Amino acid sequence: MSEPARPANPLLRRLTGSPVVWPILAVAALIVVDLIANPDFLAVRMQDGHLYGNVVDIARNSAPVLLVALGMTLVIATRGIDLSVGAIAAIAGAVACVYIVNAPAQSAASTALQACVLAMAACVGLGLWNGFLVSVLGIQPIIATLVLMTAGRGIAMLITDAQITTVHNSSFEFLSSGFVLTLPFAILVALALFGLTGLLARRTALGMLIEAVGINPEASRLAGIRARTIVWTVYVFSALCAGLAGLMISANTSAADANSNGLWIELDAILAVVIGGTSLAGGRFSLTGTLVGALFIQTLRTTINSIGIPSEFNYLFKAIVVIAVCLIQSAKARALVGSLLRPRGKPQAVPA
Amino acid sequence: MKQVELPAKSLTGGPVYPTDEPTGTPLVEMAGISIAFGGVPALADVSLRLFPGEVHALMGENGAGKSTMIKALTGVYPIDSGRVVLDGQERHFHSPADSQQAGISTVYQEVNLCTNLTVAENMMLGREPRRFGGIDRRGMNRAARAILERLGLDIDPASALGAHPIAVQQLVAIARAVSVDARVLILDEPTSSLDTDEVAKLFDVMRTLRERGVAIVFVSHFLDQVFEISDRMTVLRNGQLVGEVLTHETTQLDVVRMMIGRELEVLERLDREVSSASSTADADRPVLKALGVSRKGSLQAVDLSLYEGEVVGVAGLLGSGRTELARLLFGADVADTGELSVRDHRGRFRTPRQAIQRKIAFSSENRREDGVIEDLTVADNMLLALQAARGWLRPIPAAMRNKLVREYLEALDIRPADPNALMRTLSGGNQQKVLLARWLITQPEVLILDEPTRGIDIGAKAQIQQLVADLARRGLAVVFISAELEEVLRLSDRLVVMRDRRKVDELPNDDVKVSDILEIIAGSVRTEEPIHE
């Protein structure tokens, strides 16, 4: 009788069987808390053809974490991890801002575009480096990417001369604060990348091959999969995602700060992936889960502010909520809680 | 072929014991040991006697219970029934540390030492001589040197262990094991990664220890080595004791019979299903030709030609080089020397991918580790090799995908016939069929099957054997490797026999009997001298 009782309704059973359902419930629970603290929490208003409101803010602010987490999802699916994404974000911001500051036409749209292209090119190089260490030299991913995690901020500092480089370019700022079709541009960029990643993973064979390599590398090699190329590609993709997030963060403040841009974003991204139901052991991954995970993290941050938790309890509160969500996701923990709650001596009727 | 007389004793019921009893009392006596894992018996009423100053070989095929027996002695596994007597006293070891305390040391196949420490540090780990509250390095090196010298080993104690080849590391491990006053030394496959000279050195050390009265347990798959070094052997089969024999009183053939131990007369009546007439071998043009293919430490140079429509059976004991040969042909391991000619390609394969591009397929003996992707669906597992060959940018179109999967689910009778079932939920036999489908979908010209029927039920086994015969009839060149000799004989047109990591014989399968093959495996007849030495 240790089996947890299963709902009889097949739809409900399928829902509770899906790994995405728990993070969705967690987001919903946080919103309920917010609604209790502030009954107008979900209100959205239109102003100058732009949408404003808490929900829109959550979506926009979660964009950078979502971008990084998409790349991280694929890396984790290959049994890897990429700790260097925060540093790469900082480098991308630094490259773009320094280029804009030194360009002859500082405020031109073309300058902003060139800056972004240059920054992304730099990220490809950084991704190639990570991928080389992991797939060619066979260094453990956590160590290999730790190199760039620590050295990367130094590189960003060298690029900015250890100054906070401030830029004035409305096209660059558009990346973070612009609106298209009433919605913040950042949301659209993140959703577009989400869609693109989904297409790449599920409409080509890439997703299946990544999962195969993550689940059983040796069997995959013997089946003729170019595991090295796949792993390498995934690290480049992760660096590109991190770079895009870095540009967005820089655009938000119109500045490149080598020390604080994208600081700890790798941890938020890994958390988003894990909450989304992708196992750190590699293998099957869920991009939708990652999307929900990123939204959860931002909703939690907003909730902490909106219900007025004293700032010194911020991290503690966040930790407790995250632990709770992870426990809810664990089938073992659920079964344990279920058996504790069930009245003793009266075995519950279980539908056959 | 010389007909060999069957040793009656190995085929009768009870265990065999040598006729002359040694005068001394055994140092270790394990009596009536039984161990079961989850209700499945791993050892049933097995006994083992170790005498001081003797090398005792523990023999048996894979899964016979050798490791379990060792672990029962060293306290890794608890014993369900039976007793362990050391020096006339019954003992109960609850952990390896317990048995070590009592003077039983074990050196495993993989060296369990720290390669970043020095030789002396490794030998004295945990009992370093101390001086002024610190470690006395000079004293430690001196002590280590003394131990090494007593074993006749010339190794610098101050050198880093990792700087030495595996063989020397193994000797250091042994030196460490005996330096703690070991009276029983267990060597589990110590020679599997050593070359001939290194084995000779190891044997020197073993002889030194034997003279000092240590009881040595020696586990090895190499029959020649066992006969060279051991004084007495205990043979196990399927977790049961077959018998204890004195090495000088027995022959390699007898021991192989005891290890494999099937009713030979019954087996020999089994006719081959495939008549050699079905072979359409085009003698002029082999599909694949290997010349002098070798790899250090795993296979001595082998020549082999494969022809269309022919099944080549590879026979040999575990560790004889049969799997190593298959892996070299496929590029799963890279050969050091030799040349492969497949169609237009000449040279060696660096990756499996290169072999697959030349229409070679290989199904590994380790289904779990090297074959199935457990968390992917049956359909994905089936299409994996084809998809890998096409590259990720060209996914298999849905219509083709469905057609292929349905076709092979039906043709190979895979159950459940659900393309979306997770691979981990299938039985071993059905997983094996999915893996066969994976390779057949790539339309190979050469199919290398390493133990395709191991650990699967009788029904699936017969189906796979039938499939192999059909595939050859349709023109595939098949390499069929199996520990079950009757299976090899039934399916093959030509036989290759491996022993001690080299090809010792190649013969057409005309009326060959299991006993003939056993004879060649045991080395009592050598019809063809190896060409490359």
Image (cartoon, coloured by chain):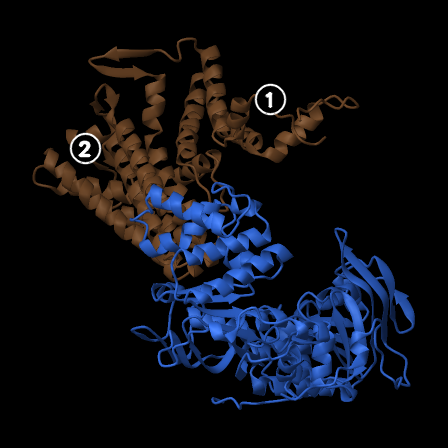
Chain colours: A brown, B blue
Identify the amino acid type marked 1: Ala
Query: SS for tag 1?
Result: loop
Residue under circle 2?
A172
Badge 1: residue crowd in 10 Å (few <14, some 14–19, many ≥20): few
- Residue B346, image quadrant: bottom left
Mark 2 or mark 1, which is nearer to you?
Answer: 1
- Image mark 2: chain: A
Tally the marks.
2
Q: Name the residue under label 1.
A: A8
| Left/right of residue A337 with respect to residue A322 in the rendered view | right
Secondary structure state at the residue bearing disc 2: helix
Residue lying farthest top? A39
Where on the picture, by quarter, is residue B255?
Answer: bottom right
**A118, B30: nearer the viewer:** B30
* A341 vs A36: above or below: below
**What's the residue at 70%, 28% (across, down)?**
A339
Residue A298, disc: none
B87 relative to A112, above or below: below
Which residue is most to the front? Answer: B277
Where does the image place residue A49, in percent across and percent down from the top left?
Answer: 20, 14
Q: Distance between the residues labelled 2 and 1?
A: 54 Å
Q: Earlier in the sequence, mark 2 or mark 1?
A: 1
From the viewer's perspective, is B89 left or right of B361?
A: right
Quarter containing the N terminus of chain B: bottom right
Q: Which chain carries label 1?
A: A
Are callouts 2 and 1 both on one chain?
yes
Residue type of the residue flagged with mark 2: Phe
